[in-house]
Image (cartoon, helix red, strand yellow):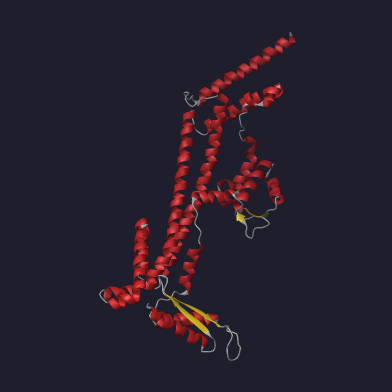
Amino acid sequence: MSFEEAHQVGNELCEKILDGKYEYVLATHIDKDHIHNHIIFNSIDVDEGKVYHSYMDIRNQSDKLCREHNLSVIDQETQKEINEIKRRKFVNWYDWNEDKKGSSFKSKLQFDIDRMIKQSINWQDFLSKMESCGYEIKFGKHIAFRSKNQQRFTRAKTIGVDYTEERIKDRIINKEKEIGNIINFKNNVKAKSSKGYKHWAMKHNLKTATSTLVEIRDKGFNSMEELERRISGISIEKNDLKREFDKLSWEQKRIKEIVKHIKIIINKREHYEGYRKNPNDKIYMMMNRKDIEAYQKSYEEIDIFLKQFPHLKDTALEGLKKKSGKNLFRKLNEHLKELQAKQEEIIKKHSSLATQYDELEHLKVNVNEYLGINKAEKKESVIAVIKKYKRKIDKTVELSHSRKNEIEL
């Protein structure tokens, strides 16, 4: 579109919507990639003093004029799809994780559920404690919670696999079976000053170490080396998931960026087609240079985008053939939803792996703390370590009986 045509369309629009009754100023700008009009008008009728109310008519008349001048018009449905893409927010793994740690409703709910599980003796006690924390509870296929400042309920299962009703109940029942930590009483001030505490700590450590090794064996590990390999494997899987999450975020970000170039391609297509038909027409080129260059620049950007994401090539090229591009924007929105659904699955998988990692790392730390295993030492089988423990237990019992006999004598 030339400056003159844009100004003409602007004048025609002002005459149609204002009908000579309202004062106006029309400015046609050519300082951007797209030529456009700005209209300022007095909302008070100069003759009768009536206030202008027909704002919807402005859009209708503008669309009508654009069609008369063979210019592209973005319909409401297409604009709705474009606006939805623009409103979407995409974050990388780090930003998502930081937000999760922060003050979001989900992160607070997760923290409170974990806290109340530790304090509850049964399911009803847990529900009562959650209500005391200010949560409204909704029962159904999936239990949901809503805090005082929250408009909608949050399904607990959306936090992670450990937050379904079944898993919460299981965690409450089995929390007594959770394995504690080994106490390092060698550097413990209380153990040094209290023989009673030191004796209790030794018994606690022996019991905890035995439970730890039994748990390691129950999980299918026959040596500490196998356990450490699994921990390393989980760590690698977690990092792979983070990279996949960021890759999906980048694709979503690029789709959002490319929308403006798709709009330019659609809006400037006729100007570029006119140039292609008459590439030597200098007057046409001079009048439409900005539109043609904007089209070429956007075409290059879309070409780069499709090389980055070749799986979208057929969708994009097919959609660009249509005049409005409505189907293309709709399909891009559908694809964005699919990408976000994949990210939600990644979050669930990562949460499950993180739980496994913490459990296994806890078992490993307990064994290493108790046995004083150095990384350079040869790793023993779990069975060998349990036998060693059994000998220690037997020796402790024998020593206890010996001391008892000495006292009796």
Dividing the image into 4 quarters, which one contains the C terminus? top right
Name the outermost residue toward the right: 408
Residue 347 placed where, x, y %?
A: 51, 49
Name the outermost residue toward the bottom: 47
Residue 391 placed where, x, y %?
A: 57, 18
Number of numbered markers: 0
Whether residue 200 can be seen here: no
Residue 206, compared with residue 286, is above or below; it is: above
Q: Nearer the viewer, residue 219 or 368?
A: 368
Name the outermost residue toward the top: 409
Residue 82 placed where, x, y %?
A: 47, 67
Dividing the image into 4 quarters, which one contains the N terminus? bottom left
Residue 74, compared with residue 385, is above or below; it is: below
Would residue 222 be found to the left or right of residue 278 on screen? right
Would residue 180 be found to the left or right of residue 306 on screen? right
Quarter-wise, where is residue 201 in the image?
top right
Whether residue 239 can be seen here: yes
Would residue 391 be found to the left or right of residue 346 on screen? right
Q: Nearer the viewer, residue 114 or 172?
A: 114
Name the outermost residue toward the left: 280
Q: Nearer the viewer, residue 198 or 344?
A: 198
Residue sitting at x 67%, y 12%? 402
Residue 200 placed where, x, y %?
A: 68, 25
